[in-house]
Amino acid sequence: MGCANQLTLVRGQILTVKLPATAGTGYLWQLNKPVTQLKLNQSDVLKYEKSEKTGKVGASQYQVLKLEALESGVATLDWVYSRPTDAK
């Protein structure tokens, strides 16, 4: 499962990405290919928010990632939902 989006940012702008995920499964949203124009804020990589519907264990949540633009320009973010140990 994956998705790709194109966006334009200016230097210093923060992009917050909120993607559906389930904590405890070992799966994470990751960039399929490195993007040199952006820096991932590591402190937010594993931040999850409870589903508004149930909040139950195993229910869908969201992985929240924050990226900072290091330079102005256009980048394509190609996200993939996989385990970090899975071979790409």
Image (spheres, helix red, strand yellow):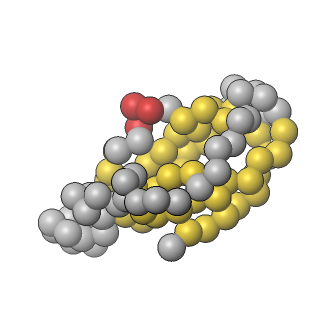
User: What residue is drawn where x is 78% and y is 29%?
Assistant: 71
User: What residue is drawn where x is 25% and y is 63%?
Assistant: 25
**64 vs 78, nearest the viewer:** 78
**84 vs 66, nearest the viewer:** 84
Is residue 30 rendered to the left or right of residue 12? left
How many marks on residues? 0
Q: Is residue 18 visible?
A: no
Q: Position of residue 2 (x, y in %)?
A: 56, 69
**34 vs 16, nearest the viewer:** 34
Is residue 35 rendered to the left or right of residue 16? right
Is residue 59 rendered to the left or right of residue 9? left
Q: Is residue 81 visible?
A: yes
Above or below — where is 19 with respect to 38? below
Above or below — where is 34 with respect to 5? above
- Residue 56 lies in quadrant: bottom left
Farthest residue toward the front?
87
- Residue 44 lies in quadrant: top left
Q: Position of residue 9 (x, y in %)?
A: 76, 40
Is residue 40 rendered to the left or right of residue 48? right
